[in-house]
Image (spheres, rainbow, N blue to C red):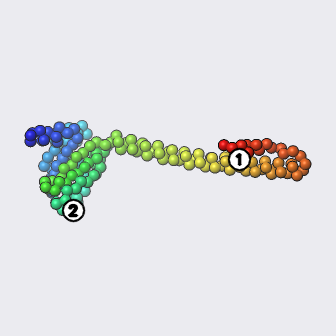
Amino acid sequence: ENAYLASFPRLNPNPIVETDSSGKIIFCNPSTAKVLESLGVDKSNAAVFLPSDLKLLLERWDRSTETTQYREIEIRNRTFGEYLHFPEKLKTVRIYAQDITERKQAEASVKQHLEEMKSLNEDLARFNSVAVDRELRMIDLKKEINALCVKAGMPPQYALDFERQGP
């Protein structure tokens, strides 16, 4: 049963790093070395997965409250989302990392498109305002001309039937 349970971190395709309460690495699963190697980083340098504020988090941790923190780190132009789990009974920090580079790129792309659409929408709203305002002024002018024509004893010059029609 212990071998079976131990297979979970060993077979996880994402890096898992565990430190003691001082921040010293005491365990890395095999995927950690594979990912580091694929990034062109020394496969024994699992410390690159430690977030820069780990020491501060360890100092602030009361060691009696289980907690989880989330961090994002950059390694060689790749972004990793990391859950740092502080289990109360083990007095260790377990770091579960996952490459989120593609997701971050997609989020940036969506954000850029959203900004572009917002800008285009503002342009369209300005154009619509100008066009509608111009059209409303034209209708008012046509009404004035029609009123002047009636005063002068002539038939109205402009048909404004569209005003009587419903939507």
Q: Residue at x 73, y 50 (%)?
A: 137
Asked where in the image residue 8 lies, by quadrant, the reply is top left
Is residue 76 something that shows in the picture?
no
Residue lying at the far left of the rendered structure: 2
Mark 2 highlights which residue?
A: 60
At 42% from the left and 42% from the top, the residue drawn is: 109
Q: Residue at x 24, y 45 (%)?
A: 97
Q: Where is residue 44 in the image (x, y as percent from the top left)?
A: 16, 43
Q: What residue type is labelled 1?
A: Glu
What amino acid type should be assigned to the residue bearing mark 2? Arg
- Residue 154: x, y in percent? 89, 46
Q: Quadrant of residue 156?
A: top right
Where disc 2 sits, the SS reads helix
| Residue 49 at x, y percent in the picture | 23, 48
Q: Which residue is drawn at 75% across and 51% down?
A: 140
* Residue position for label 1: 135
Whether residue 136 is visible here, answered yes or no, is yes
**Coordinates of residue 142 in the picture (x, y in percent):** 78, 48
